Image (spheres, rainbow, N blue to C red):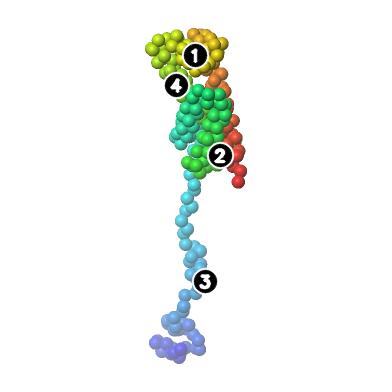
Amino acid sequence: MPEFCSCGAQLPADARFCHRCGKPQREEPIAEAALADAATFSVAPPAVDAPAPVPLSFRNPIALRVGLLAAGLVSFLMMIPGVNYASILWLLGAGYFSVWIYKRRTGQLLSVRSGARMGWITGVMSFALITLLFTFSMLAIQRAGGMSVVRDRLRDLAIQQSTVDEAMKLLQNPAEIFRSLIVMFVVMTLTCTAGGALGARLLRKP
């Protein structure tokens, strides 16, 4: 520790600065507290919020693809003779399957209400596919020979004569066809909705 400053002033013991010219007499180490304060006042990067989940509707492309996949599977099963007797189970399974696939694709756990909506979308698509398949089948049969061909095809499937007669009356009555479509729409959508709600409830359990 020098006794005199470069300006000639005599310094007291342990002086940090010259009392005459103000010149520092020794180097001071940077205090750790000062570094901590600087770190405290440093600007932190803004937090990035996770994107909000897309509402389940026909405008949701993932929901549409998942619903179409489940509807295609259940429509295929319902067109197989013998297997179609368990249509209610297939429709319930389609609703459950759509919720399971949507969860795997998005990582989003659906509420019971959202699961029911996903099942309803699947039910609407299932109804649309079944109706289109039925319409194309009827057009192809009419071109091939008309209602007589339909009667023969039903008999080939080993269906009882009374059931064949009822089916032929239904096909020849547009009003009955319209009522049947309404009933089928209600049954398919409600069953798939129940399956979707059940799937959301079960998949939320740990």
Taking 188 as reference, is 161 above or below it?
A: above
- Foreground mark, 1 or 4, reads 1
- Foreground mark, 1 or 2, reads 1
Q: Tag 4: residue type?
A: Leu
Q: Which mark is residue 58?
A: none
Is residue 174 in view?
no
Left or right placement of residue 142 versus residue 100 in this view: left
Left or right placement of residue 187 versus residue 152 in this view: right
The answer to whether the residue labelled 1 contacts the one labelled 3, judged by CB atoms less than 8 Å apart, is: no
- At x 49% / y 27%, what residue is drawn? 77
Crowdedness of circle 1 by 10 Å Cα count: few (<14), some, many (20+)? some
- Foreground mark, 4 or 2, reads 4
Is residue 142 in view?
yes
**Disc 1 to disc 3, C-alpha distance:** 94 Å
Q: Nearer the viewer, residue 202 or 164?
A: 164
- At x 46% / y 59%, what residue is drawn? 43
Residue 104 locus on image (x, y percent)? 50, 42
Q: Secondary structure at mark 2?
A: loop
Q: Secondary structure at mark 1?
A: helix
Q: Secondary structure at mark 4?
A: helix
Q: Tag 2: residue type?
A: Leu
Which residue has dot 4 on it?
133
Label 4 or label 2, whichever comes before in sequence order: 2
**Disc 4 to disc 2, C-alpha distance:** 31 Å
- Foreground mark, 4 or 3, reads 4
Which residue has dot 3 on it?
33
Which residue has dot 2 on it?
110
Q: Tag 3: residue type?
A: Ala
Label 4 or label 3, whichever comes before in sequence order: 3
Residue 158 locus on image (x, y percent)? 52, 17
